[in-house]
Each structure stands twice: as structure tokens, then as C-alpha cells.
Image (tube, helix red, strand yellow):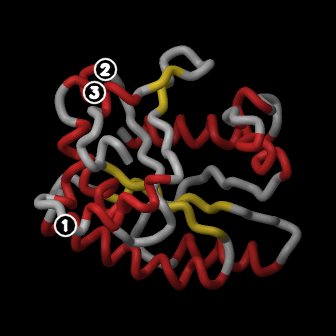
Amino acid sequence: ADVLVGRATLKEVILPTETPGIDVVPAHIDLAATEGELFTMLGREGILRDAMEGQLKQRYDYAVIDCPPNLGLLTVNGLVAADGVIIPVQTQFYAMKGLTNLVKVINTIRLKLNRKLRILGLLPTFYDSRTNLARDMLDELRVVGDHHVFTTIIRNTVKLGEAPLVGRPITSYAGNTDAARAYRELAREVIELG
């Protein structure tokens, strides 16, 4: 929130994590209120991109921007700042319906605000192989369009719900679980995509 409204630079709010080489810029509840302030700012769609330019690109190989599940100015800022998008898609009916609208928005942002933006792939999430619906939705996701679908599938597990409660990534909270292995595999897939 402080970076987006100009009270701090991105470099000033970066915090190290327990994992060497991985830093975070944590969000705060104030971030939700920041969206209203952005509407009156000139160049509001590119504020995050501008904040990330320069030294940050030299310091890090990858930056992951976790966007809210809506198409407001915070998400638009994330898409304008990004080179690639991973679209998490819950293996449920309504999530599949919303995918079409999101792809249209991404295509519009590519045309008007960020020509480098590309969809890296669709990531199946909250998958429960015990249900016919989840299996059917996964099959549908694989044929719905011309987008890459990651082979990694994020299954619905208790450990994924517990990790944020203790403030740790799944790879350190429950590093030997299928969930942790899935996120490591996803990282490998993303790196291979370049």
C-alpha cells in the first residue's frame, strides 16, 4: 500500500524470509483501501511496474506478484508489471466460467498497456480426485482453449490451509508432503518455460 501511493519505495519494504535468496514484500489490510486512492492517480495502471524497474530486476531472477481474485486496479497493476501470468483455476464450474473473462482482460492489457505480457499457463487448484466434478473440470480445462495447462495439479489438502496460519510456506512447514512437492514441481515447470 505504501509503495503504490508513494509513501515508500519497493526497496524500503522488502523483507528477508527464513529461506535464503527469497524475500517478500508483505501486504497489509490497508492495501484494500489503496485501490480507491489509485483511481485519482495519473498513470495508475503502471505504478507497480514503475516501482519494480531498475535495481529489483538486477537483484532477483523472478518476482511473483500475488494478485487479488478480482479485476480491479490492484490486479491490473500486477498484470502491467508482469511478463507472464499463471492463472490458478479451481476445478469447479464457476471458476471455469470466469476464466474466459480473465483471459479477455489479459489480452486487453497486452494490447494497450503491456506488450510483453503472456499467459504462462493454467494451474489446476483445489483439485479433489475423489469427485467426478473435479475430474470433469480438469478434463475441460485441458481442452478449453489454446493455453498451456501445467502438469502440476494443486490438490486440496489440510496442510495447504495450515501453512499460512503459521506464517510459513508449505515447502518449509510440511516439506515432505505432496503439496510441497507439487509447488516445487510447479517452480520447475515455470523455470523451463523461461
Q: Which residue is mark 3?
A: 56
Label 1: element kind: loop
Identify the mark at residue 59; answer none if there is no mark. Answer: 2
**Looking at numbered disc 2 in the image, what kind of residue is underneath it?**
Arg
Image point 42% across, 46% down: which residue?
A: 65
* Structural distance between the alpha carbons of marks 3 and 1: 27 Å
Figure check: 100 above or below 37: below
Residue 102 image offset from top left, x and y in percent: 40, 74
x then y, percent, for residue 64:
43, 41
Q: Residue at x 43, y 76 (%)?
A: 145
Q: Which residue is mark 1?
A: 40
**Residue type for callout 3:** Leu
**Label drawn at residue 111:** none
- Reading the chain from its start, which is encountered first: label 2 or label 1? 1
Separation of marks 2 and 3 at Cα, in angstroms: 5 Å
Picture coordinates of residue 148 (x, y %)? 45, 60
N-terminal of the two: label 3 or label 1? 1
Q: Are marks 2 and 1 in contact (CB under 8 Å)?
A: no
Residue in the foreground of this view, choosing between 82 and 67? 67
Residue 95: quadrant of the picture? bottom right
- Disc 3 vs disc 1: which is toward the camera? 1
The alpha-carbon separation of the residues under discs 2 and 1 comes to 32 Å
Image quadrant in which you'd find residue 118: bottom left
**Which kind of residue does numbered mark 1 sit on?**
Thr
